[in-house]
Image (cartoon, rainbow, N blue to C red):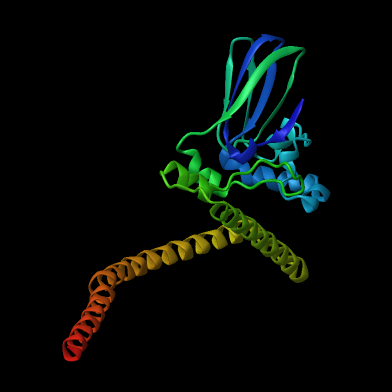
Amino acid sequence: MFGWHKEDLDLYSINYMHIGKPKFWYSVDIDCNQAFETLAASYFDDLARECPEFLRHKTTLIEPHVLMNANINMHKVVQRPREFIVSRAKAYHSGFNAGFNIAEAVNFALPSWLPVAKEANYCRCEADSVRINMNIFERRIQGDKIDTDEDIEGSVTSMYLRAAEEDQLKMALEANAQANNIQIDSSKEIERLRRLRKAKELKEKAMVRKLVQQYGNKQSDSAITGKSCKGFDKKTKLSQKSEKASKQSK
């Protein structure tokens, strides 16, 4: 059996069965993800408190009829030898084997996965959790060269700082909700924080590009006409004084 989970980084997945007994799959409609996560957290609140991404541990089992009773749309598929199963990006799924079989699976990405990956989270209680710094990833696929350790280390550090900031916000929201006996959707507030952060980054990048362009033009003019000419004029005057003194001595 394999518990309810999404793929690492919310990637797509493709599974091919070579031989053996059937494999049973259950999947949740993507538009029901939030309802599914809320339901899972209510059943396993101790795990949710320890790790907001506890479903990525692949240890959570919830019977399909429980989900259907909660109006969570889901589907069942039976996979047999020489058949493929493709899991969509950020799709929750679980299942079991009816017996021994041989199958293989691999994650893959499509261009449509990029915006999904930016919002994907990861388990922070396990040191080997799979994660990608999307800032570096996007810059690489756009052709930017990132060769220095400083570039990579700085970007990774920024990623950890953002994750810590989101964790602190979520804890503060939950504490405030509990103290005031109100309900707050922390996921929406975190999404709002991400949008504000993104808008700030875009604004800062635009300002930096403008300053670099302006400074680059001024620096170019100064380097060619200002400093070089002044230096040349100074050397010329010194040379003229030297020639005049030489003539007077003669």
Residue 67 in the image, given as x and y percentages of width and height: 70, 36
Lateral position of residue 58 relative to residue 150, left or right: right
Left/right placement of residue 26 relative to residue 127 reads: left
Residue 186 is drawn in which quadrant? Answer: bottom right
Res 11 seen here: yes
**Most extreme residue toward the right, as rendered?**
46
| Residue that extends furthest to the front in the rendered view of this protein | 250
In this rendered view, identify the residue nearer to me: 70 or 90.
90
Location of residue 167 with respect to 121 vertically, above or below: below
Residue 220 vs residue 17, the one in the foreground: 220
In the figure, 23 relative to 49: above or below?
Answer: above
Which residue lies at the image location 62% right of the left edge and 35% below the top edge?
A: 73
The image quarter in which residue 249 lies = bottom left
Q: What is the x, y in percent for residue 32?
A: 60, 41
* Farthest residue, direction bottom: 248
Please indicate whether residue 222 sits to the left or right of residue 127 in the image. left
Residue name at image x 69 percent, y 59 percent? 167
Task: Give 100 or 72, whichever is nearer the viewer.
Answer: 100
Residue 163, x across and y down, in percent = 65, 57
Whether residue 185 is visible here, answered yes or no, is no
Question: Which quadrant does the N terminus fall into?
Answer: top right
**How many tags in the picture?**
0
**Image position of 166 with respect to 81: above or below:** below
Quadrant position of the C terminus in the picture: bottom left
* Quarter assignment of residue 132: top right
Task: Name the residue: 77% across, 37% down.
Answer: 60
Vertical placement of residue 163 versus 182, above or below: above
Q: Position of residue 233 (x, y in %)?
A: 22, 80
Q: Nearer the viewer, residue 144 or 189?
A: 144
